[in-house]
Image (cartoon, rainbow, N blue to C red):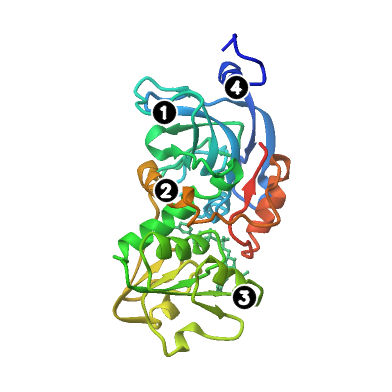
Amino acid sequence: ASSQSASSPTETIDAVVAEIPSKMKAWVYGDYGDVNVLRLDEGVSVPGIEEDQVLVRVVAAGLNPVDFKRRQGKFRATDSPLPTVPGYDVAGVVVKVGSKVKNLKEGDEVYGDISEKPLDNPKQFGSLAEYTAVEEKLLAIKPSNLDFPLAAGLPLAIETANEGLEKAGFSSGKSILVLGGAGGVGSLVIQVAKHVYGASRIAATSSTGKLELLKSLGADLAIDYTKDNFEELPEKFDVVYDTVGQGDRAAKAVKKGGTVVVLTGAVSPPGFRFVVTSNGASLAKLTPFLENGKIKPLNDPKGPFPFSKLVDAFTHLETGRATGKVVIYPI
Ligand code: NDP
C-alpha cells in the first residue's frame, strides 16, 4: 500500500486497519433507566475478538426499540452484565479478523445485527461505539448501492420482517395486513412481502400523515388508524403482521386458516410471537433485493443523528412516532 497515493481508497482502509487504538469512544450505561443513564465515555477498551469474530470499525449504527427496552431493565433476567454499550445494528469496516474467520477480510464493508438473540445474553459491548466485535456468521457484505447510514438501519428490522413472513408460511399470491406500516419493521414487512414473497395484496395501518408513505412503500390499501378500525373492515387477510402490539384485534382481521405474526404484546389464536435471530446468511439472501433497488431502506427524516446526539435520537425513537429507522452517523 505504501506505493499508492495517500488518497486512494485502499490506502484509507489500510490506515484504518493499521491504527486500531486500545481505547475508544462508546456510549455506556451502568444502571437501568431512562435516557439519562447514558453517558459518552472516551476511555472504553476496544473489544478483543474471539477466533470466529471480526473487529468492525463502526461507521454508522441503527437504533431499535429493543435497545431502550433493554436499557429500561425489561430483559434484566437474561441480559448480559452491566455496564453496557448498547446497540445491535452496525454498518462498518472490518479491521481485524479472528483465526477461524473464513470469508471476511480486513477492509470489507459489512452490516449486521451483532447479537444472535436480542434478549438472551446480548453483547455487552454493542455497536454504539467506535469499534465492536462480531461473529462472522452474523454479518453480510454491505449492499454496494447503499451508504453506511442506510445499511445500518436494516439488519435487525429486515431480518425480523423476513423471519416473521417465513414463519407465517407467507408465499406468492397471499394477502397481508401490516399493523404499523411506517415503522422500522413495518416499512420493511411491506416491501419484503411484496418483492421477496410476491404478496397479491398489501394493506397497512398508520396515522393520517403517513398514509401516502405506506402507498409509496407498496401498500395497496392504507388504513388511517385514527379514523378506521382495521378489524371492522369486511376484507380479511391471509396473514396479519402486527408490529404494534394489537394481537387481540389482529386476530379478528385474519381469514379462516390464516395466521397472525406478533412482535410485541398479547397473542391470540391463530397468532404466534417470535423473537428474531440474527443471521448473516439470511441478510445476504435479501441483499440482491436491496441492490436491485426493489427494497428501499427508509431512514427517519429527523436523522441521521451524529454520535454526540444519541440521547436526542433515543428520545425521538422512544416517542413511538419514528418513520422508518433512526440511525446514528457519523461515529
Ligand atoms: P418503531 O419505533 O420503528 O415503530 C414506530 C412506528 O409505529 C411509527 O411509524 C408509528 O406510526 C407506528 N405506530 C405506532 N402506533 C401505531 C398504531 N396504533 N397503529 C399503526 N402504527 C402505529 O418500531 P419497530 O418497527 O422497530 O418495532 C416495532 C415493535 O416490534 C417494537 O415493540 C419492537 O420492540 C418490536 N420488535 C420485536 C422483534 C421481535 O423479534 N419480536 C424484533 C423487532 C422489533 P404513527 O406515527 O403513524 O403512529
Residue hosting label 2:
288
Q: Describe the element under mark 1 as helix, strand or loop.
A: loop
Q: Are marks 2 and 4 in contact (CB under 8 Å)?
A: no
Residue in front for this viewpoint, 193 or 116: 193
In the picture, which quadrant includes the C terminus?
Answer: top right
Q: Calculate the distance from the C-alpha at mark 4 to the C-alpha at mark 1.
A: 16 Å
Residue 104, disc: 1
Snapshot quadrant of residue 140:
top left
In the displayed image of the protein, which residue is found farthest to the left? 257
Q: Where is residue 202 drawn, in percent x and y? A: 44, 73
Residue type marked 1: Leu
Residue in front for this viewpoint, 196 or 293: 293
Closest to the camera, between mark 2 and mark 1, is 2
In the picture, which quadrant includes the N terminus?
Answer: top right
Q: Calculate the distance from the C-alpha at mark 2 to the C-alpha at mark 4.
A: 28 Å
Q: Where is residue 188 drawn, in percent x and y? A: 49, 60
Residue in front for this viewpoint, 151 or 254: 151
Q: Earlier in the sequence, mark 2 or mark 3?
A: 3
Residue hosting label 3:
207
User: Would the CB of label 3 be found within 8 Å of ligand 1?
Assistant: yes
Ligand 1 visible in quadrant: bottom right
Residue hosting label 4:
16
Closest to the camera, between mark 2 and mark 4, is 2
Residue 140's place in the image compared with 232, above or below, is: above
Q: Earlier in the sequence, mark 2 or mark 4?
A: 4
